[in-house]
Amino acid sequence: MSTPRGIRNCNPLNIRRNSTQWQGLRPEQTDSAFFQFISMPYGYRAAIRTLVTYYNKYGIKTIRGIISRWAPPSENHTEEYINVVAERTGFSSDEEIDICNADDMIAIVAAMSFVENGVVADKSEIQQGYLLAFAS
């Protein structure tokens, strides 16, 4: 069984390459579609910062809102993704969530990582990513 792309790239939520200069990017980006990070915590940091932007800039406060933007139906089975994240976190898909609550954020990101990679995330790496996300 091969290692999932998101794990190989230390980009567990499979953030697509764009012009963002994330902290912790590998100096050489060899994947043409997705960012590659130097460690999993930096990949989680980028994901967490993105979700905080969704919350603060766009007012996205539910799992349905987060996943609909993160994984649109044009590219994903969005409703299935929403259902898995809701089930794994224990939140209703339309429940308002305080995305800045560490425990809630870690649960959501862990569930999203599971959907993206098919493996259970190491929550200590997500915690490190959370701390990196709010370090400055």
Image (cartoon, helix red, strand yellow):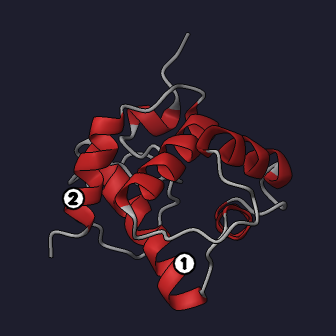
Q: Residue at x 76, y 66 (%)?
A: 94
Identity, as a three-letter code, of the amino acid under mark 1: Tyr
Query: Relative to 8, does residue 54 appear above or below in the rendering?
Result: below
Q: Earlier in the sequence, mark 2 or mark 1?
A: 1
Which secondary structure lies at badge 1? helix
Q: Quadrant of the C terminus?
A: bottom left
Query: Relative to 75, does residue 107 appear above or below in the rendering?
Result: above
Identity, as a three-letter code, of the amino acid under mark 2: Leu
**Along the horizontal axis of the image, is 55 left or right of 67?**
left
Q: Which residue is mark 1?
A: 54
Out of 74 and 100, give the one closest to the viewer.
100
Q: Quadrant of the N terminus?
A: top right
- Extreme residue toward the top, this view: 1
Query: Relative to 73, does residue 14 appear above or below in the rendering?
Result: above
Q: Residue at x 48, y 68 (%)?
A: 99
CA gap, disc 2 and disc 1: 18 Å
